[in-house]
Image: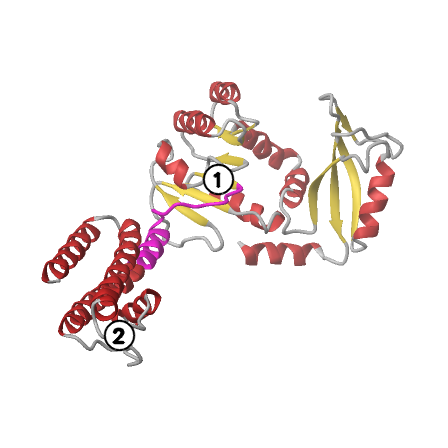
């Protein structure tokens, strides 16, 4: 019996040493395994010395396991007690091992939660179930995220940046690391994401990010900024669905000189914060064959506080029809772009709301 007790202690010590050397999560698993093994060994030894070879002939193995759990937890109900010398030896060893196991389990469990929380705060954790990944650490990225949250509040966004932000965004998981590195994008959930927005200001970095992301997720839809025309071509060849060129800002700046109202209009309709907004309707099977006025009528019935005006129809064939007529027939897969005007919202009120949210 002394030999068996020594073997049990030796096994437990070996397990404890191994647990302390392993990473946190593995330590937790090994702690549970060690606790289970200790319970089975202690219960079996108690059953042998007290039941099989001892005076408690009515003691069963299952009751001995129950005794081991109660003893290791230091509860001690007193319904089952050792009556032999070796039974008391087993009980003493079980109590010591139980205290060590429970202490180790609680500390390891707390460590797991602490490390998980710390990693999330520092942006070093792994994000799961992501819909959109945004890469870049500038105001363009922040505005893109804000617009996504306004128009699609239920989606999960992961923001990848090289340094931890001073003011972490609310309701957005951020990941800190090199955006051109596979591991950083994997931690951001790129492998199962549906969309990627690349708004870094360096063209070579943007191309590198796109190529890395496409390698990890072939079906990823990507929108990216391009500072030069050459970069725009390369990004399209790399698999970017929509390239937003910086030269578009030049057109807007020029318009600010000779047609400022156009600039104000674009600023108003390209965000969901103001009085008007540009919206896209994808024609599904239930709407295929209908005309433009039917779609507008359905939208206004669903939302009586808004008016809709069709400004562009992107045909499934690639053709673009500007200011489509009311009787224009719509086919499956067509995309109808409309201006949505919110009734009862004054322009100055919309502007003040916009400024408050900024």
Residue picked out by circle 2:
56
The residue sitting at the bottom extreme is 78
The residue sitting at the right extreme is 327
Q: How is the image coloured?
A: secondary structure
Q: Position of residue 330 (x, y in %)?
A: 82, 30
Seen from the viewer's position, the closer of residues 188 and 26 is: 26
Whether residue 95 sits left or right of residue 219 in the image: it is left
Q: Is residue 142 visible?
A: no
Q: Secondary structure at mark 1?
A: strand
Residue drawn at 56 percent across, 49 percent down: 149
Q: Residues within 10 Å of mark 2 (few under 14, many from 20)?
A: some
Whether residue 129 sits left or right of residue 266 in the image: it is left
Counting residues from the N terminus, which is met first, the one under dot 2 or under dot 1?
A: 2
Q: Position of residue 49 (x, y in %)?
A: 20, 67
Q: Residues within 10 Å of mark 1 (few under 14, many from 20)?
A: many
Whether residue 348 sits left or right of residue 344 in the image: it is left
Question: Magenta residues, as a range?
Answer: 111-131
Circle on res. 133 = 1
Seen from the viewer's position, the closer of residues 285 and 64 is: 64
Marks 2 and 1 sit apart, C-alpha to C-alpha, by: 65 Å
Please state which of the two labelled residues, at mark 2 or mark 1, is closer to the viewer.
2
Q: Is residue 227 visible?
A: yes
Seen from the viewer's position, the closer of residues 77 and 341 is: 77
Residue drawn at 79 percent across, 44 percent down: 308
Circle on res. 227 = none
Residue drawn at 32 percent across, 65 percent down: 61
Query: Residue 43 is drawn in which quadrant?
Result: bottom left
């Amino acid at each position: 019996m002394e030999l068996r007790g020594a073997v049990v202690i030796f096994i437990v010590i070996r397990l404890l040493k191994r647990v302390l050397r392993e990473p946190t999560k593995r330590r937790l698993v090994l702690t549970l395994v060690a606790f289970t093994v200790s319970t089975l060994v202690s219960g079996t030894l108690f059953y042998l010395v007290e039941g099989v070879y001892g005076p408690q002939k009515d003691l069963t193995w299952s009751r001995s396991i129950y005794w081991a759990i109660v003893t290791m937890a230091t509860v001690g109900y007193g319904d089952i007690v050792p009556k032999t010398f070796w039974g008391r030896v087993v009980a003493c060893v079980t109590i010591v091992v139980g205290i060590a196991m429970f202490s180790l389990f609680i500390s390891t469990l707390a460590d797991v939660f602490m490390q998980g929380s710390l990693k999330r705060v520092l942006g070093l954790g792994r994000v799961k179930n992501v819909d959109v990944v945004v890469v870049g650490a500038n105001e363009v990225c922040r505005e893109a995220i804000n617009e996504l949250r306004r128009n699609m509040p239920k989606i999960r966004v992961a923001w990848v940046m090289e340094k931890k932000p001073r003011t972490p965004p609310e309701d957005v998981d951020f990941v800190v690391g090199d955006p051109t590195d596979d591991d950083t994008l994997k931690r951001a959930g790129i492998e199962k994401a549906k969309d990627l927005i690349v708004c870094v200001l360096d063209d070579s970095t943007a191309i590198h990010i796109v190529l890395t992301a496409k390698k990890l997720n072939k079906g990823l839809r990507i929108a990216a900024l391009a500072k030069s025309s050459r970069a725009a071509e390369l990004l399209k060849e790399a698999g970017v669905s929509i390239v937003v060129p910086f030269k578009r800002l030049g057109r807007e700046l020029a318009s600010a000189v000779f047609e400022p109202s156009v600039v104000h209009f674009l600023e108003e309709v390209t965000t969901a914060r103001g009085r008007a907004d540009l919206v896209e309707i994808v024609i599904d099977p239930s709407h295929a064959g209908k005309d433009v006025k039917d779609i507008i009528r359905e939208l206004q019935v669903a939302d009586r506080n808004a008016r809709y005006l069709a400004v562009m129809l992107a045909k499934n064939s690639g053709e673009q029809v500007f200011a489509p007529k009311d009787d224009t027939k719509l086919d499956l897969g067509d995309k109808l772009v409309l201006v949505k005007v919110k009734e009862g919202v004054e322009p100055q009120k919309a502007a003040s709301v916009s400024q408050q949210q900024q």
